[in-house]
Structure formats: C-alpha cells, structure tokens
Image (cartoon, rainbow, N blue to C red):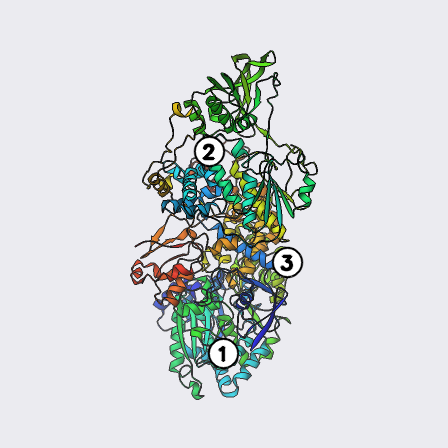
Amino acid sequence: MSVNITINGIAVTGNDGDTILKIASENGIEIPTLCHHESVKLYGACGLCVVEAQGVGKLLRACSTVATDGMVINTESERVIKARKIALELLMSDHEGDCKGPCTLECPAGTDCQGYVKQIALGNDREAVRIIKDKLPLPASIGRVCPHPCETACRRGLVEQPISIAYLKAFAADNDMKSDDPFRPEMDEKTGKTVAIIGGGPAGLSAAYYLAVKGHSITVYDAMPKMGGMLRYGIPEYRLPKKVLDAEIAQIAELGVDMRNNVKIGRDISFDEIRSSHDAVLIAIGAWNSMATRCKGEELDGVYGGIDFLREVSLGERHEIGENVAIVGGGNTAMDACRTAVRLGAKNVYVIYRRTQAEMPAEEIEIKEAKEEGVVFKFLTNPAEIIGENGKVKAVKLQIMELGEPDASGRRSPVPVEDEFETIEVDAVIAAIGQRVNPTGFESVELNQRGIIKADAASFKTNIEGVFAAGDAVNNGAGIAIAAIAEANKAALAIDGYLHGIDISYRPEYVSRRVVSEKDFADREKIARQEMPHRSAEDRRRDFAEINLGFTDEQARNEAKRCLECGCHDYAQCSLIRHANRYPIAPDRLSGAKHTCEVEQKLVCIERNQGKCILCGLCVRTCEEVAKKGILGLVGRGFPTVVKPEFNNPETIRGCADCLKCVEVCPTGSLKIIKK
Amino acid sequence: MKIVIGQGSCGIAAGAAKVYKALEGINTGAFELGSTGCIGMCFLEPIADIYDGDVLVKRLVHVDEKDAERIAKAVCENDLDSISDLFITDDDASFLSQQTRIALRHCGIIDPTKLEDYTAIDGYRALKKALCEMTPEEVIDEIKTSGLAGRGGAGFPTWFKWNAARQSVGDRKFMICNADEGDPGAFMDRAVIESDPHTLIEGMLIGAYAIGASEAIVYVRAEYPLAIINLKRAIEQARENNLLGENILGTGFSCEMRIKAGAGAFVCGEETALIESLEGKRGMPRLKPPFPAQKGYNQYPSNINNVETFANVAWIILNGGEKFAQMGTPDSKGTKVFALTGKIKKGGLVEIPMGMTLREVIFDIGGGIRDDAEFKAVQMGGPSGGCIPADKLDTIIDYKALGATGAIMGSGGMVVMDQTTCMVDVARFFLDFTAKESCGKCVHCRLGTKRMLEILERIVAGEGKEGDIELLEELCEGIKDGALCGLGQTAPNPVLTTIRYFRNEYEAHIKEKKCPAKACASLLRYSIDADKCIGCTACAKKCPVAAISGSVKQTHSIDAQKCIRCGQCASVCRFGAVTVC
C-alpha cells in the first residue's frame, strides 16, 4: 500500500505507515531535525521537524507523524519557520562553545587558521596550503605582509603570545611551491562563460582564481606592466620578494587565467567594450592615488605621495631620494616609505606623525624595525608648511601638537600647541597619509559621496547589470590586502551565482562564541612564540633583500603545536550550526543562564562537554537501545537537566564498552573521542 | 446522638484529630463518635456534625479540643443551645446549600474507612447494574449520553476515550486513574480519595468493564499519604467483598487494582509521562500518536481518566446519563468541582452545575473578597490556565466560555486575587513553577519557560526593557506551537492572559519602574511622612539594616540606599507615617 501526499506543492508517494519526515527525505526535501535517528525510537524533543498540514490546527512533528493519503504538507510555511527559529534561538542561547577559533572569525577572509596550523604541526604542508587556498590563493605573499588580525585575536595571547599564524602560512606555502607536487585546485567543468576582471591586485587575482576554479574563462586586465597590484608596486621588496609573488601569480595563470598587462581602461580599451564582450565584469582597480597633505608648499619639486614613491622604486624608475627625507603619516605605507628611503641611501629619515606611537596604525614590528634602521620618529608634529627654494623642497616647518579629547575612532585627537613650531631641513617630503580611488574610465559606474565605487555590500553588484566591484576601490575604500581578498571571494561567489542565473547575497554566518579570559587558560604550560629569524638592522638597511629568513622546519612545527585549537572539532559535521544558519536567527535576545563548558567529564575514551550538549538524548537512547548498555541517563529536571551516568552514579561508567556509538550520533560537538 | 468529626487532611491540619482525641478521651459511651472525610468547607474547619440517627441535627464549626467537654455535655444532656456559639451560621451554611454535589456526594457524610457506610447509600449498586444489566457498549453509550468530559483539565469526552480503548485490540488492557493532582491550589481529587475512596474504585471498575480492562492502576502522588492509606484500605475491603479481583459479584468479570505512588513530578500528570513513570522510567512525555488507547502502559491499550471524572461515573450509571446531561450548558454537561482559594472569604471545595457564572461562585458561594477588598482577578486552571479580570466575572463556567477568556477550566483550581496582587508577579510565579517542573525533554519547554521566567524576573526586579512584552509574546506563541506535551503547550497561558488583561501593569514595571500593586519589593520606595511621624523610634529599632535615622521626637528618615524594602517599618508604625510608593 502506498500513500500519496503533497509536500510544498509537489506530489510524492510513500509507503503506508511512513512518517512525513521519511517521505520528505526520500524525495530530497530536507526537514531539519536534531533528535531523530533511524537507529533509535521516536523521541520528538527538538521540535525542529515541525511542519504544517492543511486543515490541521497544530503543527505536526514530521519525525513521528505518519502520513495519511491526501495530506497537504508545507515544510517551510511562515508559522513553521517561526517555530523553528524560536527552537534554534533557544538552543543557541544555551550553547556554550566556539564553532570556529577567534583567528578564523577575525580573518576578513575567514581562512581556517586552526585547520592549517594543525596540518603544519603535523608536517602536512600541502594539506595546509589546500586549506588556505580555500579562501586565499596567495598565501606565500599574504603570509609575509598581512597585519594578521588572526594573531591579534589568537587566544594563545591569553597564555603568553599569539601563534605566529601569518609566518606559518608563508612557511607552508613556500614549502609547497618548492615541492615536486605543489597544490593545484580541482577545476570544475568549463561553463563557457567569460568574466573580465579589471585590476590584477590581490582582489582581482583572488577572484580570478576562484572563478577559474568554477569553470569560467577569466581575463584579468591590468594597467601596470606586471600583475600583483599593490602587492608588487606598494610593498617593498625587502618585505615581499617579487619572485615569491611572481611564483604565486604563475600558479594562478596556470589555471588558464588570461592575464593582460599594460591595458588601462579608458585609454587602451573602453569599459563598455569590456562589459559587452564578457558575461560578467569585476572591477577591482584598487586605490592608487595618494592623498594630498593640503599644506602650503605641496606643489614643490621633491614632494611625493607615499604610494607613488613606492611604485617608482618598484618600477626601477627611482634610485635615490636625497639625504634628508621626511615621511608624513603613521601607517604601514609610511613605514614602507621611510624604510625604502633608508635603503635608497638617505642619511636622515624622519617620520612626521601628529599623534604618539601608541596611536600609530602601523604594525609594531614595522615601527621597531624602522627605528633599528635609524629612522627618527617625530611624534606630535604635523607639517604646517613645506618651505622651498628655487621651486624645490628645502625644509619642512612642523607644528607642534598635543593630544586632546578622543575622537570618533576613540583615539585622542591631536591639537596644535599655539605658536610652537620646529623646522627641519629636508630634500624630500613623502606624504603617506592615505589613498584614493581613481575612477577615470569608469564614468558609467555609480560612485558614493566619497568618490568611491558603490557596490551592494552583500551582492557586490554595481549599478550596471552584470558588473560587480570589490576591494580597495569599493564602498569603504582602501584597507588591508586580506580584506580586499575577502570581498573578492564573496564577489566571486556572487558572480558565479549570477552566471548560473542565481541571485546570491552574502549573509554573515551565525556562529557560537565563548567569552573567555586569562583565567580560562591558567593551567596551560607557557611556551614562548618562535621568533622569526631575520637579518640585522645594519645588514638589511643597505639593500632590498628580504629581511626575514624564514622559519626552520623545527621552528615551524613547534610554533604550530602551540595552537590551543579553540574551534569546535565537530564544526564541519555539526547539525546544530548547519540548521542555525538555515534561517536568520538572533539568539542574543534570549540570552540568559547557560550550561558552561567548564565541567567536562571523561567517560572511558570520550570527553563530554555539557556546554555544547543540546539534550537531544541521542547518546542516552543509543547507549540503551543500540549498544544495549544503558549507562547514560538524563539527570535533573527542567533547565538544569544534564546527560550523566544513569542515576548520576559514576560507577555505571564501568559498563562502557568503548563502542563510540554515542559519539557517532551526537549532532553537535558535545562528545569527542579522546586518546586512551 | 452521634458526633462526627471531619478528618480530611485540611480538617486534621486545622486540629480535627485533636478534637476527636479529646472527645474520645471523655466518652464513656454516652454518645457515639465517628469520623468522616472532607465536607469542603475549609474556612470552617475543624467541623463536628451532630447526628440523631441519620439526621444531621447541628453542624459545629471552628471547634477546638478545649470545646470537647462542653460539646460532649451538650450532646449527652441534649442541650445543644449551650454550644450555640459553635453553630454554623446560616450564611456559612449557604456555602453548601448553593452547591449541587455529584462527585463530592459522599464527601464529609460517610466514613471513608467503612465499606458498609458506602454500600448503605447505594454504594456498588452502579457496578452491579453495569455488570449484570448492561453490555460494555451500553455503559459507554450511557456515558456518551451524559456528556461527561475529562475533569483533569483538557475536557476530552470520556466516552470517546473509553470507546477508543474498547475498540483497540490487545491481550491486556489497563484502566488507569490519574491522581497526580499537581496544580497549585487544586485539591478536589485528594478530597475524593480521602473521603470517598469506594466511589473512585467503583467508577474505575465500571470503566474497566466498559473498555475490557482486567487491570486497574491508581497513580497517586506520594504527597497524599492519607489518600493512599484510605484508598489502600478501600481496595482491600472491595477485594474481601468480591467487588474486586476474580469473578466480581459472580458476573465473570475480573479486574485487579493497585496503587502506584508518584514521586511528585508535576509533568507525571501528563498522561504519557504518567505511563512512562508507571513503567519505571523517567517521567517524560511521549510522542502522540500513538495514543494511550492504542499503545499505553507497557504498549497495551490503556485509558486514563482523572479522579473527579471517575467520581461521576457510578452516579451516571445509577441515575442515567440523561439526568447528568440535564445539568450544565449545551457544551458542558454536569457539575464541576472547584477549589476556591486565595483572597476569598469562604475558601473550600465547591461543586456546581456547569453554566453558573464566576461571579456567583466567587461572590454568592464564596462570600466575596476577604476584608471586602476589591476583586482583581481569578486564576483558573493552574499553571496551564490564566487570569480572568473583573470585567469578565459574568463569564459562565463552561469549557468554551472559559477558553475564550484565555484561561481554561483546568482541573478546577480557582485562585482569587485582590488589588494587592501584582499580575506580573503572578505570571512569574506560575512560570517559575512550570520551568522547575519541566521535564527537560523538549527544547521549547525546557529553554522557553526558562527564558520567559528570566524575562519576568527581570521585569519584577525593575530591570525590564522596552520590547520585553513583545519578546514574551513571541516566546509564548513559539512555545505553544513547539512544545511536546500539554505542560509546555499551556505554560504560556498565565503570561498571555496577564499581558492581555493587565498589559498596563507590565508597562508600569518596565517603563516607570513601578509596581501598581505595590507587591514587587525591588520597585518599592519607602519614605516617612514628616507630618505624621512623631519620632517614636519604633521603625528605626525594627529596621534590620539600620536604614532609618532620627532621634527621639524628631522626624525620622529612610536611607533609600540602605533600605532593603522589607516593609517592617510600615508594619510597626502606629501612625501611618511610613509611605510606600
């Protein structure tokens, strides 16, 4: 006998006695459930599998409701979704754990830092690179230059110092590239669709990589002689040797990406022509104009923009800068500029910064190394006037500043000290105070008030059909490379969707996070972070060769082993988080008492984390019904209920046969196999 | 002459056992001394009835052991006027005279320890009639005619359940009585078992015959020790008299009966959780279907009814379903017992025909609000029920009409509240109860009631936030839809009804940080009225945290920072100088 029912408007057939859940599942319709498992009896605790049946007042639990002929079921009605959302929000409000490590969550591109650090610890560099390249196709380059928000977030910092995640990434990528069999992604079938990517910087190259992997034909157009964008023309050789970048770009080219240099939009080809000859376009042109200082004397010969100066040096167009050089600004570009000036032979290099070192946005290591190389930092000064002689820079007059009230960014804003000035003799002034987008050639693309290309923050669509934009040229303007790559990845997904006729908008993933402090790690052994071997200041300031010498194999493995593995071991398989991301949920509004992670009880070879337990009872029921042991039970009533040895009697644990069946059925990461 | 002392649990609590003992001590055989169960007039306990033969001559109330001697003397000398101060007043007597008693028909009249008392007033005649003169189907038809519905709360037609269990195929069938009465403020089932256990046995046996069960189980909470003793004795008596066991009354029908004492989990009043508990498992509800009628106790077809439902059965068989159905409304037939408690003048058990209004029950039978205060609301149906406000007092007692208010008939708890009751705090109280009594199985109940409780606790503590009411409402809807069993599905009712009728009180707590009923301590501010304070220092001496300062004959003042809002100053002040706002 068979039953004919309708699920979501589709007529389906099942066997007499089948539940709605079974028939739906057999017909490829997923009804979420957390407490149901075929191997054990019906239970009905989670309430996720509710569905609406026409003519029935109550919502039905699909796991237990036997389908009857003619039933009309809706598995995703508004009421159903509402009930499921409440269930998921309630569950997440009492779920204490880290789905992902803070390193991954803080990485703009969401690279699985914990995953690749683990592989490096195990000596599997190729596997590490595979994991990295899931999100970042330029690991050797980015590993060298990234300001690594991952490390700032790293919880090892609560023990002593964070893991050296960025350098480990470069280490694995270098090794992989040197190997006989470097990682190469699996390519999807060719789609026959073409995508033009305008701009061959980190964003453009990254999008090219992911779209090529998806089977699309990619052409990257770039105005400069070589690919790499700011990685090549904005970052000095001593931080990122161009041969490393070349090798990574070559790997992308090997995927069949057509790379065309010296093509400037509006000069060599019109934007319309590009648009009309491709199925989709990604604008990733970056922000290549230096911001002006807007002080008197700016037009003098010897005043340069920071990125312009770095570009000229990279191109080999400039070999000297003068004896006395002032760099204005406190960011990483200012550091690159002052250290480049040192390497060009400047004797006195000054960094003019209107606040103090504590407020500097540049990385601490950059400041430290610049100081070692002899750069003089003039904090709390601001150029008031650039003084010239015969049209050429002669000196810079500095207004002395002091710190006032905090501004919108929380930093104390500098205010001039009346009538206090200082003048220093200089041959050149380099203004590294910011970058601007130059949208020339993209006149049909809509800009925001700040003159930056406007793209939808979730879909990366511009005002023109089929044209997307990402990276420094978009919305918020210039940022760090990994942020541009992150945007490019999301844009690539949106473009891939667009090429398949699907509208894809990026939605931030919901994850569970723990709030921790130093106390939580008080019992950890302190192991110092491995210091990156590097050339001495005296040695390195004379040339542009790479400063860092790279980790030894032993150093890298030891460093990687320091990882605390904060992210949940079960994240990839976790049904809870998968369902939690099915609907937009906001569990924080229901925050209250929680079961904590602190109490961890060890079964024979299983570690149980009450904080992650959702009381679906599958372990208890499997132990009783499948393993026929019955050593687990629910203890307590209501909210305080926990899974414990039956009747809260620890002695019962002795009956455990290590069958691990409970771990297999656990829908979350509450149970974990530990080594005996 | 015979003196009969009401010795139900509440009578004993009020001192009935001491009165009995005192009378026993002085009785030299000049009068007869007897016991009975609970008459339901809690507000008059201990009660002593004086009988001349079978005729109740006088009812004495609020008797004390010290009165024993003069009562005995008055009875012996036939000079009852000498104890006229103990006579029940006509007004108090009307509490009973306005009732129609079916389920409680023998309570407070017969001696529950004596089978002969029961058989003397038609006891077991209904069983005999059913077994000898009726087929099981005819019994079910009679119940159907009566319109009897489950008195435990849900109000499901009894005949329908019996018929389903009758139709269900099984080697063994079970007739189960749910005597796990757990609603705060409800105690009618206890009264029936304590005061008239044979009525329950007879009702269950008739039901067992109707569905074809050969085994009967009474699941009674262990907190009812007297009920268990009386029921156990009654089961023995019935067995000894061939009213229970093999070949009952020679009719060929056999049925065993046993008691299972429950360990006190409220959720075990839910029928599937009760079955799990009976089976020796953790008391957690099962998925329905299968319904107990299909797969119940140990997977056998089972039928579960509550005590009050069974207490009506013998009467219906004896008097006919038609007669039962004549009482009540088109939707709700017969009578219903209510446990009238709270701020009511006459608290106790009230059995009235369906269709009477709440006002009649509370004001005519119950005598109105204690201290003649203003009525605010009546809570019906316990943790699954809701609060009905003053403007709905003319609602009739009927499953549909009560349901329309957002409350439910429930098992019959009727808690009366006056203006000093904070409705937000009432909701918090019931949520605290359900959250603690949740079995923890399903997400919506385990976590939903907990989160709702946390929000309510926040509100009464003065930490309510804009949007809390809406969040509560959203949670309520989610829990109603998602919870596995009746406990969870109905847990939002106290919150929903208080929001519906007393939303302004919630808003006052959240927005103005004020409790209009002046019940939520965290929101109260105590101060001393300088015009009234004479500086007697009484409040300062009483204050447990030394928050009151001021010297003799000087106006005192309260340090709001130190004050813990215990209210002792206000209660000790003889001049009404302590004001609360």
Chain holding disc 2: A
Residue in front for this viewpoint, A197 or A378: A197
Query: Label 3's element?
Result: helix
Residue in front for this viewpoint, B548 or A281: A281
Q: Which kind of residue does numbered mark 3 sit on?
A: Lys
Is the Cβ of the residue at disc 2 closer than 8 Å to that at disc 3? no
Query: Label 1's element?
Result: helix
- Work out whether residue B369 can be spotted: no
Is the Cβ of the residue at disc 1 closer than 8 Å to that at disc 2? no
Residues tagged by mark 2 and mark 3 found on one chain of the structure: no
Query: Label 2's element?
Result: loop
- Which quarter shows the C terminus of chain B? top right
Q: Nearer the viewer, mark 1 or mark 3?
A: 1
Chain holding disc 1: B
Q: Which residue is mark 2?
A: A241
Residue A390: horizontal and vertical position, in percent? 60, 11
Residue in front for this viewpoint, A36 or B94: A36
Residues tagged by mark 1 and mark 3 found on one chain of the structure: yes
Q: Nearer the viewer, mark 2 or mark 3?
A: 2
Q: Which residue is mark 3?
A: B392
Q: Which kind of residue does numbered mark 2 sit on?
A: Pro
- Label 2: few (<14), some (14–19) or many (≥20) C-alpha neighbours in 10 Å: some
Gap in angstroms between the C-alphas marked 1 and 3:
37 Å
Gap in angstroms between the C-alphas marked 1 and 2:
91 Å
Residue B318: horizontal and vertical position, in percent? 53, 81
Q: Which kind of residue does numbered mark 1 sit on?
A: Gly
Residue A526: horizontal and vertical position, in percent? 32, 38
Q: Which residue is mark 1?
A: B207
Numbered label attached to residue A86? none
